[in-house]
Image: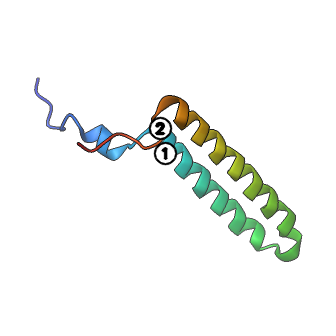
Amino acid sequence: MESWIPADAPGRMLRGPLEVAGLMVDVCAEGARTFWSYWGPLGEPAIAVIDSVAGMQRGYLDWLGTLSGQWSGVSSE
């Protein structure tokens, strides 16, 4: 049975698992920063921790990307 979905569609939609993981780190960190910013000065320590942890996660994803070569995602060629 012939599929109506192009063979390269998953590659175009999902540029690589590490890129998606990086996007998830950014989105979750931004949401947590927004929540804690509503607490004013009481939330500043939590925001500092969020930035630190997000930076460590991005560094880990970069390291994984250098090992696997997937960080740049699937080429669109």
**Residue shown at the point (31%, 42%) measured from the top left:** 75
Q: Position of residue 35 (x, y in %)?
A: 72, 66
Residue at label 1? Answer: 20
**Residue shown at the point (74%, 50%) measured from the top left:** 53
Q: Nearer the viewer, residue 23 or 74?
A: 74
Quadrant of the snapshot with the N terminus? top left
Q: Position of residue 19 (x, y in %)?
A: 48, 45
Residue 12, numbered label: none
Disc 2 crowd, CA 10 A, few/some/many (<14, 14-19, 20+):
some
Quadrant of the snapshot with the C terminus? top left
Q: Check whether the beta carbons of the residues at disc 1 and disc 2 lie within 8 A of each other.
A: yes
- Side (left or right) of 16 relative to 36: left
Quadrant of the rendered image containing residue 3:
top left
Q: Is the image coloured rainbow, by chain, by secondary structure, or in one colour?
A: rainbow
Residue at label 2? Answer: 17
- Residue 41 to residue 7: above or below: below
Q: Residue furthest left?
A: 2
Q: Residue furthest top?
A: 1
- Side (left or right) of 31 relative to 41: left
Quadrant of the rendered image containing residue 46:
bottom right
Q: Give how far apart the Cα atoms at labels 1 and 2 are.
A: 5 Å
- Side (left or right) of 72 relative to 34: left
* SS category of the residue bearing label 2: helix
Q: Position of residue 66 (x, y in %)?
A: 53, 35
Q: Position of residue 26 (x, y in %)?
A: 59, 56
Disc 1 crowd, CA 10 A, few/some/many (<14, 14-19, 20+):
some
- Residue 70 to residue 12: above or below: above
**Residue shown at the point (57%, 34%) measured from the top left:** 64
> Looking at the picture, which amino acid does disc 2 mark?
Pro
Quadrant of the rendered image containing residue 5:
top left
Q: Nearer the viewer, residue 32 or 53?
A: 53
Q: How many marks?
A: 2
